[in-house]
Amino acid sequence: MTNYNSKYIYPFGGSARPTESADKQIVGGKGLGLEVMSKIGVDVPPGFTLTTPLCQVYQKDNDLPAAVWSGVREHVERIERDMGKKFGSRDNPLLFSCRSGAAMSMPGMMDTVLNIGLNDDTVEGLAKATDNPRFAWDSYRRLLDMFGEVVLGIPHEDFEKRFDKVKENANAKNDVDLT
C-alpha cells in the first residue's frame, strides 16, 4: 500500500513536521521555497504542496486516489487547527491559495487561484472579520475571475466586460468606488 501522504503531499509551516529532503523536481520551485523557509524558521503560513508526480496520476485516472483526497482533508484539518479558522465557515473562514509550480520558473505560464473557500456565505464572515466589506467582496470577485479563467477556461476579458457593466450601472469609475 502506497503512503500517499508522504509520496504526494508535502506539508509545511505551522505544526507540520518538515520533510527530510524536498526535491525541486517533485515539489516545484515554489514548494521548495516554502519548505526551506519553514525549515529555517521563517514564519510561513501552514500549507501543503501536492507533488508534480500527482499530475501524472490525475491525467491517467482523471481523478486522484481516495487516499490522496483523505490526505488533503487531513492537512486541511491540521491547518484549521493551526490557524484557528475553519474552511467553509461563515463565521471564521479559512481561505487557501492554489498555485501551480514547476522545477523551472516559467513567468506567465503558472496559474494561481486565490481566496479558495469564499462563497456567498463565507464572504459575509470575511467582511465581518476584517470589518471591510469592500475587501471581502473584491476578494470574492477575484476568486470567481481566477477560478473561471484557470479552471473553467472562461477568458479574463469576459469577467472584465461584465465588471465594467456593474461599475457603469453603479456610476462607479474605479473598482474601489464600489462598496
Image (tube, rainbow, N blue to C red):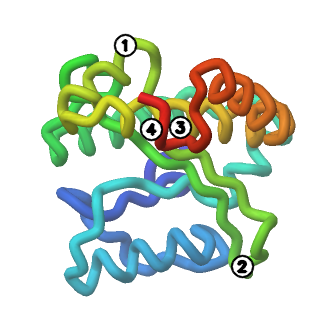
Disc 1 target residue? 121
Residue drawn at the location 52% of the way across and 46% of the way down: 114
Residue drawn at the location 49% of the way across and 48% of the way down: 97
- Distance CA(mark 2)–CA(mark 1): 36 Å
Observer-nearest of 4 and 96:
96
Disc 2 target residue? 105
Mark 3: which amino acid?
A: Val
Side of 163 relative to 178 (left or right): right
60 in relation to 52, above or below = above
Q: Secondary structure at mark 2?
A: loop
Disc 4 target residue? 72
Side of 45 relative to 131 (left or right): right
Observer-nearest of 1 and 146:
146
Instruction: Mark 1 and mark 4 in contact? Answer it, CB < 8 Å.
Output: no
Residue 12 in percent (x, y) is at: 34, 63
Query: Which quadrant holds residue 63?
Result: top right
Instruction: Mark 4 and mark 3 in contact? Answer it, CB < 8 Å.
Output: yes
Residue drawn at the location 21% of the way across and 59% of the way down: 14
Mark 1: which amino acid?
A: Asp
Q: Of callouts 1 and 4, which one flags the residue occurring earlier in the amino acid sequence?
A: 4
Q: Of callouts 3 and 1, which one flags the residue occurring earlier in the amino acid sequence?
A: 3
Disc 3 target residue? 68
- Distance CA(mark 1)–CA(mark 4): 23 Å
Q: Of callouts 4 and 2, which one flags the residue occurring earlier in the amino acid sequence?
A: 4
Query: For the residues carrying marks 3 and 1, which lies nearer the camera in this image?
Result: 1
Residue drawn at the location 25% of the way across and 59% of the way down: 16
